[in-house]
């Protein structure tokens, strides 16, 4: 009985989270124009320098941003460190593989902004702008980022574990996660195009490339040569948990539409990637974006701009953290 009560309470809290009124109308692109005039320049300098020093930063920040927004809304809750009294979002099993470069670029920007205009810029805004800057730097579309988010006051691993999509989920489950949050199937497919940069850990695909079944060593939806390449690249993944492979084997450092071109050829790393071409609801959008990069860029820009406004906090529902990894 106690377990059922706890489960109901969890579902209720999640449901309430997504029916709360949006505060996105209070955000503006010029929010820091007077309170922190150097905001844009500091953000541009920080993201550029970090990406040059660590080329994996763009993919890391983009993934961090998605994992932040889909759980509590775009409120920087993913940045909070755990304490003896609270296991935070970033320590949920599904988030343990988030690359450190994404966290680091936010910390660097926050440090510089606290020197220039202390107590003014939220960590949530920093993550949103850093992500946009890095996507653009990799050749992706420029999109507007409205500002004025406040940092959330809740960060719990249990919420992340239940809400975030997993590569092993069915397409029905993944679509439900996005449609429940107000995103269409087309927007979901466009957002998944973020996999055109970044990488996946070998541990995430090990069950698909080793001992898949009695009749096949790997998932037959893979291109056979590609599967063999993955098996070779990931051979030591048990000894080295950080071992990873690029999401886009063709142009891993360019934000372009080759991710979609790869999928019909069996060159999708994750099971959920390959599933996009097998489902009648998602396949038409994969085909559209594969043949028309402009259409992909326009759709991605609109979808991620919408995502960036999802579940934002204002007033007493948030704060401006002094440090991005802890509540004030």
Image (cartoon, rainbow, N blue to C red):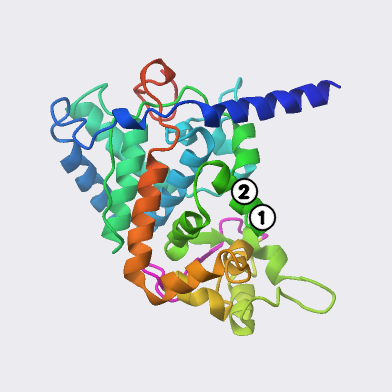
Q: Where residue 268 sits: x, y (%)?
A: 56, 70
Q: Is residue 2 above or below residue 135?
A: above
Closest to the observer, 135 or 104:
135
Q: Nearer the viewer, residue 309 or 235?
A: 309
Quadrant of the image containing the C terminus: top left
Measure the C-alpha gap from mark 2 to mark 1: 6 Å
Residue 251, percent from left and from top: 39, 73
Mark 2 = which residue? 176
Q: Judge by depth and name the residue closer to the eye, 297 or 203.
A: 297
Q: Crowding near pointer 1: few (<14 within 10 Å), some, many (20+)?
A: few
Q: Is residue 270 magenta?
A: no
Q: Is residue 241 left or right of residue 284?
A: right
Find the residue positioned furthest to the top.
316
Q: Residues within 10 Å of mark 2 (few under 14, many from 20)?
A: some
Q: Is residue 328 above or below residue 113?
A: above
Task: Reply yes or no: does residue 250 show up in magenta.
Answer: yes
Across and down, in percent, residue 196 comes to 43, 65
Q: Is residue 212 positioned above or below 70 on the image? A: below
Point 81% across, 26% down: residue = 4
The magenta stretch is 238-257
Q: Are marks 2 and 1 in contact (CB under 8 Å)?
A: yes
Residue picked out by circle 1:
172
Identify the image quadrant of residue 294.
bottom left
Q: Quadrant of the N terminus?
A: top right
Relative to 83, say whether 147 is above or below. Answer: below
The answer to whether one can see residue 249 in this image is no
Number of marks = 2
Q: Secondary structure at mark 1?
A: helix
Which residue is at a point 61% across and 30% down the rendered structure image? 14
> Label 2's element?
helix
Residue 314 placement (x, y as % from top left): 37, 23
Chief secondary structure of the magenta portion: loop
């Amino acid at each position: 009985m106690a377990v059922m009560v706890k489960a109901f309470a969890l579902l209720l809290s999640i449901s309430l989270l997504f029916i709360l009124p949006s505060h996105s109308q209070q955000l503006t692109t010029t929010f820091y124009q007077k309170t922190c005039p150097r905001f844009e320049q500091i953000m541009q300098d920080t993201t550029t320098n970090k990406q040059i020093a660590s080329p994996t930063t763009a993919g890391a920040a983009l993934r961090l941003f998605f994992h932040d927004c889909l759980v509590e809304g775009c409120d920087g809750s993913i940045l909070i460190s755990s304490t003896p009294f609270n296991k935070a979002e970033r320590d949920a099993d599904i988030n343990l593989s988030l690359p450190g470069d994404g966290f680091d670029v936010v910390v660097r920007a926050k440090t510089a902004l606290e020197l220039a205009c202390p107590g003014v810029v939220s960590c949530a805004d920093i993550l949103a702008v850093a992500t946009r800057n890095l996507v653009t730097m990799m050749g992706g579309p420029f999109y507007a980022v409205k500002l004025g988010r406040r940092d959330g006051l809740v960060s719990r691993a249990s919420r992340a574990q239940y809400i975030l999509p997993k590569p092993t989920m069915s397409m029905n489950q993944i679509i439900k996660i996005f449609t429940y949050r107000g995103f269409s199937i087309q927007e979901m497919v466009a957002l998944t195009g973020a996999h055109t940069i970044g990488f996946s850990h070998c541990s995430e695909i090990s069950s698909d490339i080793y001992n898949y079944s009695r009749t096949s060593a790997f998932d037959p939806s893979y291109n056979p040569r590609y599967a063999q390449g993955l098996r070779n690249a990931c051979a030591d993944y048990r000894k080295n948990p950080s071992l990873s492979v690029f999401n886009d084997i063709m142009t891993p450092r360019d934000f372009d539409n080759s991710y979609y071109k790869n999928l019909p050829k069996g060159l999708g790393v994750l099971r959920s990637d390959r599933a996009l071409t097998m489902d009648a609801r998602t396949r038409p959008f994969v085909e559209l974006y594969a043949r028309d990069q402009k259409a992909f860029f326009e759709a991605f820009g609109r979808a991620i701009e919408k995502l960036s406004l999802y579940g934002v906090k204002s007033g007493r529902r948030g704060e401006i953290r002094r440090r991005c990894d802890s509540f004030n």
